[in-house]
Amino acid sequence: MVGHSAHRAAILAYDECYASSLGGFADVLQIANSHLRKRHGAKGSHFEWQFVSPNGGPIVTSNGLQVATRPIRAGDQFSIVFIPSAHYSGSKAFDRLLARQSVVREWLVSQWDAGAYLAANCTGTFVLASTGLLDGRLATTSWWLAEQFSRRFPRVNLQLDPVITEADRLVCAGASASYLLQTIRIIERFAGPVIASQCAKSMLIDVSQTKQTPYLPLLTDKDHGDSVVHRAQHWLQKNMIKDVRMSEMAKDLGASERTIIRRFQAALSQSPLRYLQSLRIEAARSLLETGDLNVEQIAVSVGYNDTSSFCRLFREKVGLSPGAYRGRFGSEGKGS
């Protein structure tokens, strides 16, 4: 798609969006233009961008920065439309924010119908999904909003493993800072892999971070009113490093194994064994991040005598080996 013309980008600005992703998308395009000029000269292809909003007035970002915008017009056609993330201050406020985007939704559909790439990041993916364009297509979003996203948009094929998804000119990215990787992807589509690589290197953007899995918590607070499950959770936490037997837990809790398994599944959508595995792996992650025990010692300290089994389970749950995880997230950057 490299040519001798401008690639026109519209950066959608709206109240409460993050200034970092709003302006950051343009910043990376500006770096791309520098590399394009060096490689192709002043007459080569380049990126142009406008900050746009439905009314064309100034918008106020979540940190109080005012940004001047131009109004979106039916006749304008862009090659790229970027939807930045917004600050999430609660479900009701977020509902109101999304409800205000009716004009934006129609405009986004018209831009996509005319051939534009639509890119949305973090909470901005909710704006894109509300158009219906993601129905039946692959998408991702910020991991901590996944359940809410799935409830709102059940027809979307939501996947949390990839940092970036792309389907039919619809590019989604995970939590807010992933807009950097997303912009590199857009630059690659329009200016080629060489320019994209040069941008990533000059801005220290690690394009190897293709998965969200290492960042996702295995245990999330899930409200439920089942006292048996609460007691079972506490029992598993207390006995995590032991050779856990369901029969022993059932005896201590005064409930049958079948009852515990059934109620655990209903309350937490997983079995007690899967919950126990997550407890152990989360404990191991903490030790890898802050401690200096080797992998064998960590395996034993969280309840696994077989180090190879522990390493297989860790990779399955986290997407990295224990050594690679420590290398990325350890406080001293040590391998093991």
Image (cartoon, helix red, strand yellow):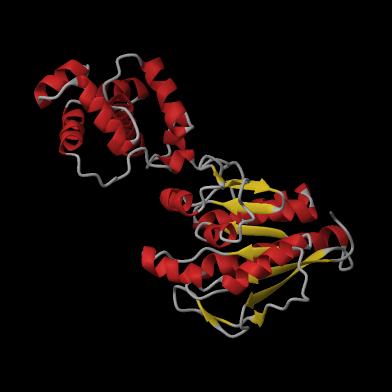
The reply to whether residue 291 is visible in this rendering is no
Front position in the image: 327 or 186: 186
Q: Is residue 219 left or right of residue 139?
A: left
Front position in the image: 328 or 238: 238
Q: Where is residue 36 in the image (x, y as percent from the top left)?
A: 80, 60
Quarter of image, res 268: top left
Q: Where is residue 197 in the image (x, y as percent from the top left)?
A: 71, 49
Q: Where is residue 296 in the image (x, y as percent from the top left)?
A: 34, 20
Check the image and report above or below for 76 versus 149: below
Q: Position of residue 198 (x, y in %)?
A: 72, 52
Give the number of marks.
0
Front position in the image: 54 or 220: 54
Q: As drawn, which residue projects farthest toward the bottom?
A: 57
- Residue in the image at 45% along x and 73% along y: 62
Check the image and report above or below for 135 versus 296: below
Q: As drawn, which residue projects farthest toward the top?
A: 306
Quarter of image, res 251: top left
Q: Is residue 114 left or right of residue 26?
A: right
Q: Is residue 269 left or right of residue 319?
A: left
Front position in the image: 217 or 114: 114
Quadrant of the frame with the N terminus: bottom right
- Residue in the image at 68% along x and 47% along y: 167
Quadrant of the frame with the C terminus: top left
The reply to whether residue 309 is visible in this rendering is yes
Q: In this view, does 108 lie to the left or right of 193?
A: left
